[in-house]
Image: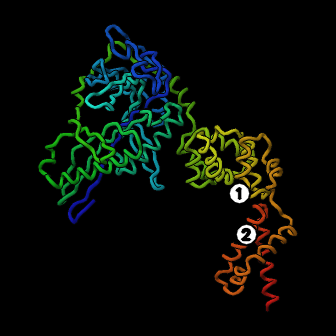
């Protein structure tokens, strides 16, 4: 946004809460289970009842270290737990066990691609904590509280104020979700509250040669990429609008805010002024010992890291010659990308496989409500189907039919092609018959080719398509095109 004397620059930092995919909670053995009966997955520990003592979930720590390493963080060899004191109805013990001055991971970075340009986003910290419960507002006049989520392991990731637009924030969120699911540390399903975003937004406004900063607004608990994008866009425009309306009021005189997002109205609304660190009265958690990580354990976790999505996409483009779009689609799911590479290793041509994964196998998987790797055909048969297309044995259209048949039949793709009558015909005498029939049925198209050179190429393409239709997709399109061109030349010669 700008006028003659005013320019603006949006500044965004993200706080992301990632629910870790452990079977039990952070400090007790209650099950982590979405949609269980309200308040049925609780115990004295996660409810904070007197005399109950927490015990740390070591698997949650290892998952947090895995994510921290993937985010290029420095992993602390010694850290501790702290009590973050505040009261809301969904936190009955009046404090949250978190990490304050010694986070598990710090000083990292995460690279993203925006319109083909690399952007590096700083990671200030990645620390472990326990989740709170959930307030439910679906009954008029009262708020219900479900404490099943209380105590669920959370990894809170805090970025630097390095993002400059709603699009960049959304791109970061998408890539981070892809990363944590790739690593297996979270399912990352936002509809289940397993990943929540809280953007901190303010605007640098330059006017009359001076720069002003609007107060920071933290927008709480966004659980979709669409909501994140819309909320950041709205909030940045709102802050500029308010600054223009009352500059004196906003220049250092208005406190930072926590705001909620009203998705139906498309607006943010003030909830309260933003708490400062001293408001939480942090102190070391007396019921838990510090966490010490041996260098050998961190090295073991680092060695187990998979190839990360961004690097894998780049390799698929550079080594396997996939398009950037196809590579991104395939790499989005780690198990599907693994299956793709297995099919290439089995001899399937990467280019054809890429198109089939994106257009054929993805469609069949969507229709069945599964992911590609969950479909019945194994990598060898998937690769064999791509080879049939690459070798010209079947057409791409015929391959679609064969792929669907492969879901219910263990036969090889070639056997299915032969049984279904889909093997491409390369017999010139048979294709000649189809060409004769097409020319006889499309005299007008033939005349256009003969009389209008500008339309000749399109006309021959049309006739070739008619041959493919007449043959049920079995005719060799290259040979069909050659025979059509030869017959057109013969007609021209006889007419001349």
The answer, for residue 323, to whether it is visible in the render is: yes
* x and y percentages locating residue 392 in the rendered image: 78, 58
Position of 54 compared to 392: left or right? left
**Residue receiving disc 1:** 397
Which residue is most to the bottom?
496
Figure check: 233 above or below 333: below
The answer, for residue 64, to whether it is visible in the render is: no
Residue 255 lies in quadrant: top left
Q: Residue at x 27, y 25 (%)?
A: 88
Which residue is most to the left?
248
User: What numbered label is drawn on residue 107?
Assistant: none
**Residue receiving disc 2:** 466
Q: Quick one: label 1, few (<14), some, or many (20+) residues within 10 Å?
A: some
* x and y percentages locating residue 55 in the rendered image: 42, 14
* Mark nearer the N terminus (2 vs 1): 1
Indicate the quadrant containing the C terminus: top left, top right, bottom left or bottom right.
bottom right
Residue in front for this viewpoint, 1 or 259? 259
């Amino acid at each position: 946004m700008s006028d003659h004397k005013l320019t603006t620059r949006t500044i965004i930092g993200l706080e992301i809460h990632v629910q870790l995919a452990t079977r039990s909670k952070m400090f007790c053995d209650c099950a982590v289970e979405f949609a269980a009966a309200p308040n049925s997955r609780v115990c004295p520990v996660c409810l904070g009842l007197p005399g109950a003592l927490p015990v740390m979930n070591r698997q949650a720590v290892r998952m947090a270290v895995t994510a921290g390493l993937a985010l290029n963080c420095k992993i602390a060899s010694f850290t501790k737990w702290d009590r973050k004191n505040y009261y809301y109805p969904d936190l009955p013990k009046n404090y949250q066990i978190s990490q304050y001055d010694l986070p598990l991971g710090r000083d990292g970075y995460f690279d993203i691609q925006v319109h083909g340009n690399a952007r590096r986003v700083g990671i200030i910290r990645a620390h472990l904590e326990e989740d709170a419960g959930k307030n439910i507002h679906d009954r008029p006049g009262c708020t219900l509280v479900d404490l099943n989520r209380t105590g669920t392991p959370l990894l809170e990731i805090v970025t630097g104020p390095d993002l400059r637009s709603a699009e960049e924030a959304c791109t970061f969120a998408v890539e981070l979700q892809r990363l944590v699911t790739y690593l297996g540390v979270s399912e990352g399903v936002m509809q289940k509250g397993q990943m929540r975003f809280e953007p901190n937004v303010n605007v640098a406004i330059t006017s009359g040669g001076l720069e002003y900063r609007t107060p920071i607004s933290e927008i709480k608990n966004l659980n979709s990429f669409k909501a994140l994008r819309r909320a950041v866009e709205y909030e940045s425009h709102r802050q500029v609008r308010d600054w223009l309306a009352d500059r004196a009021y906003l220049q250092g005189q208005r406190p930072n805010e926590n705001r909620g997002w009203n998705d139906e109205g498309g607006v943010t609304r003030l909830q309260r002024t933003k708490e400062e660190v001293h408001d939480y009265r942090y102190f070391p958690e007396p019921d838990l010992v510090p966490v010490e990580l041996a260098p050998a354990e961190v090295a073991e976790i680092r060695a187990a890291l998979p190839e990360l999505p961004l690097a894998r996409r780049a390799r698929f483009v550079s080594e396997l010659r996939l398009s950037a779009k196809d590579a991104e689609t395939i790499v989005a799911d780690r198990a599907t990308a693994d299956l793709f590479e297995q099919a290439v290793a089995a001899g399937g041509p990467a280019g054809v496989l890429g198109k089939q994964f994106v257009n054929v196998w993805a469609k069949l998987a969507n229709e069945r409500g599964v992911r590609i790797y969950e479909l019945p055909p194994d990598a060898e048969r998937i690769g064999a189907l791509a080879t049939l297309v690459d070798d010209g044995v079947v057409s791409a259209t015929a391959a679609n039919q064969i792929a669907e048949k492969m879901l219910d039949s263990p036969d090889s793709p070639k056997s299915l092609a032969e049984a279904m009558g889909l093997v491409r015909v390369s017999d010139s005498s048979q294709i000649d018959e189809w060409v004769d029939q097409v020319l006889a049925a499309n005299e007008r198209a033939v005349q256009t080719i003969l009389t209008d050179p500008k339309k000749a190429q399109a006309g021959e393409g049309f006739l070739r398509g008619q041959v493919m239709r007449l043959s049920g997709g079995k005719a060799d399109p290259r040979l069909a095109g050659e025979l059509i061109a030869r017959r057109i030349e013969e007609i021209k010669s006889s007419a001349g």
